[in-house]
Amino acid sequence: MALKSLIRKQELLRRKILTPEKITRLNEKLLKQFCKLDFSGVRTVHLFLPIEEKNEPDTFLFIDWLRREHPEITIVIPRADFETSLMTHHVFAGREMLQKNKFQIWEPIDDQEHSAEIDLVLVPLLAVDVRGYRVGYGKGFYDRFLEASAALKVGVSFFAPEGEISDVHENDIRLDCCLTPDTIVYF
């Protein structure tokens, strides 16, 4: 068992030392796992966009695959409000309709929000434990979003789940499963 603060530091370093070649291989393997998800009945997928400077998984690969293989699925992306620690959700309109904010996070330029139900959410994380609890960057954006959502909650990680997080909070939302390069782990 370990504290989130310690896990966060360890996992940020673990990602930082990945070579570009290793990241490319891990992303290719993650895409293969993503393609194995059951998209029958899924009308809307919410994806986080990668922060390249933090070596996050490349969800643009997932977007490209969804647009090619499931053009009927609406792709939704977030915009973070750092004043309120809440997110708004917007239909992905193409890479040309994105810009980076001051934290180097890709966000939609369009202000029109998506308000319909979301069926599947890809959740960013630094680490996930064997019970499906995750460690993020510590701001709680996704926990606040997911607490009111019935969507399938799918983590995306370069690394397999390990141990247990000792300081899980009552507001922490558990994932349903997590994509790793080698498998999909169901909780």
Image (spheres, rainbow, N blue to C red):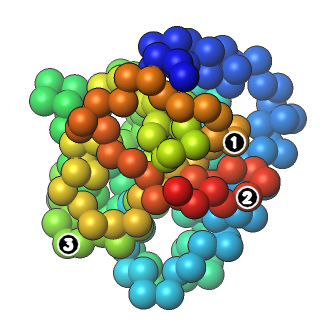
Mark closer to the chain start, 2 or 1? 1
Q: Which residue is mark 3?
A: 116
Q: Quadrant of residue 139?
A: top left
Q: Which residue is mark 1?
A: 160
Q: In this view of the protein, which residue sits in the foreground, 171 or 182?
A: 171
Instruction: Reply above or below: 58 against 40.
Output: above
The amino acid pointed to by label 2 is: Thr
Q: Are marks 2 and 1 in contact (CB under 8 Å)?
A: yes
Mark closer to the chain start, 2 or 3? 3
Q: Which residue is mark 2?
A: 183
Instruction: Reply above or below: 175 against 119.
Output: above
Q: In this view of the protein, which residue sits in the foreground, 14 or 47?
A: 14
The amino acid pointed to by label 3 is: Ala
Relative side of 181 to 100, left or right = right
Q: Secondary structure at mark 2?
A: loop
Q: Residue at x 44, y 24 (%)?
A: 166
Q: Residues within 10 Å of mark 3 (few under 14, many from 20)?
A: few
Q: CA distance from mark 3 to mark 1?
A: 32 Å
Q: Residue at x 56, y 79 (%)?
A: 38
